[in-house]
Amino acid sequence: MGKRENEEHHKLNSNNLNHKEKDLLWDATEREKKLTGGLIQKVKGWSKLEALFKHPLYNMPPQSLQDDDWLLRVKTNTEHTSDKGSEEEEKEEEKEDSIDADSDWESASKEEGYDKVSWTKEVETHPPWLRFHLGISRWELYDRKDPNLAQLTHYLARQRVLGAVQKTGGTQLKLLMSFPNYGQALLKPMRQSRDAETDVNLFYFSDFERHNGEIAAFHLDRLLGFNRIPPVVGRLINVTSEIREITADHRLSRTFFTSPAGNVCFYGQCEYYCSTEHPACDLSLAPRRSWRSPWRRSYSRTKLAMWEKDPAYCDTVKQTPPYNHGTRLVDLIDMAILDFLMSNMDRHHYETFEKFGNETFLLHLDNGRAFGRHSQDEPTILVPLKQCCSIRRSTLLRLRLLSSLVSVSVTS
Ligand SMILES: Nc1ncnc2c1ncn2[C@@H]1O[C@H](COP(=O)(O)OP(=O)(O)OP(=O)(O)O)[C@@H](O)[C@H]1O
Ligand SMILES: [Mn+2]
């Protein structure tokens, strides 16, 4: 992904593809047929998903990455002694940025319930969440083929919950869960049943969040070959033993009550408070930048957004940094396509890792309002694609491939 796709910024003229493009598409489809014999269901015992991921479009040659294309890295011994900045600066940096290579990493807090930490620079000693973080690059959040992903999701679903506090930011109730191996996860509680469809009379901004929306979004993003959504799993939580009895968050514990049916429930406090006892450490090592989407909805019952009034709105966006350079515009269009497929009207912001500047992938966080409507499409979500008439070549090819797979499975 990334630089390789810089050249893939691709113009679609009223859906007319030129010969080369048709060849490419044909080639992709033919290769897919060869690979699967045209029948996706049963290919040498592969599942449909395995067959899809074996397709060349999902196995582009890996891009060579330089040191500064990784979000985090374990420092080598030589770097410890190299003397570029002031000594103090370097010490500070070492503390923040490295797992000491000479001695095992020691937990400063030694809090009860946490595993004894003996991480070294050797990857085998790292817990799955740390391996995941060390695998984040400029162009994707994770490598789909990394065997660590399965371990990570297994841990997310199974590990003992050590702590639960309310998470800062946003409008919905979220808990920050801690695990014995020092990993953390964001928990969004189930608010409505899996099949509940958004009431047609609800505005998009008053729709409830959906736990299954977050789960399915992770998988859809992976299916599209983006790898821009952090792993999400469904997990049954015992509200009494895994939240109430272990939380050190007093504001949260005060909101527990027993419902008329005798169930233990909680409602949390949605206004944010800052606890120095429980800092969210995720941003100190890898700060992120939040960007307002140019195609953000108005979040008003009466006002229209600029893009709704001006059909040539994309011309303005295209001239505005950072959309006037690199892959940023096609990245935004990728996001619109993802959002259209899952009917997410709530993409007001997106994030990037600050370290990578403007040459990087976009993080698609917060998909809780996705998949609320399955009986009807929402064409306005595709407005960025329609107004800009641009799409990343690899996205177009994957979409064509996916639609051919869907029709094969429907007709065969
Ligand atoms: N998987 C994640 N890893 C790290 N940080 C996350 C993750 N998911 C969300 N966050 C952080 O938490 C913030 C709030 O999360 P989210 O946007 O999902 O909540 P929300 O209550 O729906 O917000 P809003 O009301 O603004 O839509 C995000 O902006 C992001 O910075
Ligand atoms: Mn939200």
Image (spheres, grey):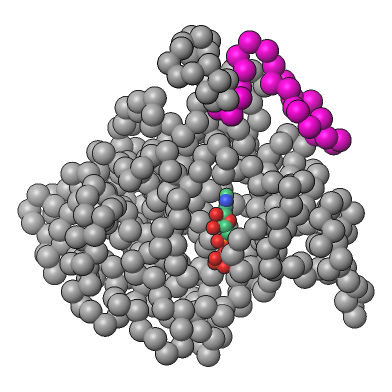
On whether residue 117 falls in the magenta region, the answer is yes
Seen at 83% across and 68% down, the residue is 255
Q: Of 100 and 407, which appears nearest the observer?
A: 100
Location of residue 221 with respect to 159 vertically, above or below? below
On the question of residue 154 being in view, the answer is no
Location of residue 21 with respect to 347 vertically, above or below? above
Q: Quadrant of residue 261?
A: bottom right
On the question of residue 62 being in view, the answer is yes
Please provide percent x and percent y for residue 80. 53, 13
- Span highlighted in magenta in the image: 94-118
- Quadrant assignment for the N terminus: top left
Q: Of 38 and 334, which appears nearest the observer?
A: 334
Please provide percent x and percent y for residue 39. 36, 52
Q: What is the magenta segment's predominant secondary structure?
A: loop
Seen at 71% across and 60% down, the residue is 273
237 with respect to 101 (left or right)? right
Please provide percent x and percent y for residue 6. 22, 44
Location of residue 403 with respect to 61 vertically, above or below? below
Seen at 90% across and 80% down, the residue is 260
Please provide percent x and percent y for residue 278. 74, 47
- Quadrant assignment for the C terminus: bottom left
